[in-house]
Image (spheres, helix red, strand yellow):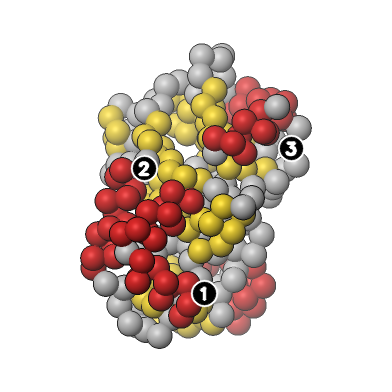
């Protein structure tokens, strides 16, 4: 029944239950009876209990932009569980937005840019300092092999001057269809984090117009919900149709994650 609710609403917040430890959270996840999805993404995650991992370790003052989990990886989870064991002192909300709302509104507010993104595609370059850890090797050839096997990137480049690696994706349409909904599967905005950054252009290399990005950001403001964490909260998100983000905040913040098919 909850699966049907999730499909309909995109996210479910379970609040007021006595979930205090990674083991408690693990039991909540198991109770849903969904298949485990084994994490193989770019973030540095530590396993704390069966099917339970730490969330992205990027410093809390940074905003983690809206995304579908593992959209750039060949295999991605259908569903995400988040669990708050310690609520942030300040900020640190997990924000969610229906991804089909983003596409629908972009069709209204930035139709031309969206059309070009779908027809010519976008190119995304993700530059990472942490490729040794990501691919568990310091060998460039091995890292390239793993990247091409695991990620949907089309090519790889190593930058000798600063030791970083570029994973080059596309041209690809950022829009995908799941469950009859057209969703913004790939990020069209750029980001800069401690470990990695991204640059996005149209498939032909042309910059995405500022007005289109402005429209996108306004749509995000209009359509997103901030989940202000309370200890024991479990948030279930349909990863195929809902994007999530992390607002900047202050420690402590203990939020754990579990991925399912
Ligand atoms: Fe995420």
Asked which secondary structure carries label 3, the reply is loop
User: Which structural element holds mark 2?
Assistant: helix
Q: Is residue 178 visible?
A: yes
Return the residue at label 3.
Answer: 34
Q: Quadrant of residue 33?
A: top right
Q: Which residue is mark 2?
A: 223
* Mark 3 neighbour density, 10 Å: few (under 14) some (14–19) many (20 or more): few
Looking at the image, residue 62 sits to the left or right of residue 94; the answer is: left
Distance in Å between CA atoms under marks 3 and 2: 28 Å
- From the viewer's perspective, is residue 182 above or below residue 114? above
| Number of other residues with Cα within 10 Å of mark 2, as a class: few under 14, some 14 to 19, many 20 or more | some
Q: Name the front one of labels 3 and 2.
A: 2
Residue 189 in the image: above or below residue 162: above
Q: Residue at 35% across / 71% down in the picture?
A: 112
Which circle's residue, 3 or 1, is located before the other in the chain? 3
User: Residue 180 location, x and y as percent?
Assistant: 62, 52
Residue at mark 1:
172
Depth check: give the residue in front, 196 or 73.
73
């Amino acid at each position: 029944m909850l699966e049907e609710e999730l499909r309909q609403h995109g996210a479910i917040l379970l609040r007021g239950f006595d979930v205090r430890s990674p083991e408690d959270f693990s039991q909540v996840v198991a109770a849903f009876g969904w298949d485990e999805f084994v994490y193989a993404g770019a973030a540095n995650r530590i396993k704390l209990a069966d099917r339970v991992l730490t969330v992205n370790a990027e410093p809390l003052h940074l905003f983690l932009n809206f995304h579908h989990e593992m959209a750039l990886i060949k295999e991605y989870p259908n569903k995400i569980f988040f669990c708050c064991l310690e609520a942030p002192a300040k900020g640190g909300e997990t924000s969610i937005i229906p991804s089909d709302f983003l596409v629908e509104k972009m069709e209204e507010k930035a139709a031309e840019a969206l059309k070009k993104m779908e027809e010519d595609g976008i190119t995304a370059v993700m530059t990472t300092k942490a490729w040794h850890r990501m691919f568990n090797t310091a060998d460039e050839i091995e890292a390239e092999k793993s990247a091409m096997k695991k990620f949907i990137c089309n090519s790889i480049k190593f930058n000798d001057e600063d030791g970083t690696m570029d994973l080059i994706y596309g041209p690809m349409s950022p829009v995908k269809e799941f469950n009859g909904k057209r969703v913004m599967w790939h990020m069209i905005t750029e980001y800069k984090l401690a470990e990695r950054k991204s640059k996005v252009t149209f498939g032909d290399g042309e910059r995405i117009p500022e007005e289109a990005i402005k429209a996108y950001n306004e749509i995000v403001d209009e359509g997103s919900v901030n989940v202000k964490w309370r200890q024991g909260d479990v948030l279930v998100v349909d990863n195929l149709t809902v994007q999530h983000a992390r607002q900047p905040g202050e420690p402590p913040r203990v939020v754990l994650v579990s991925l399912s098919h």
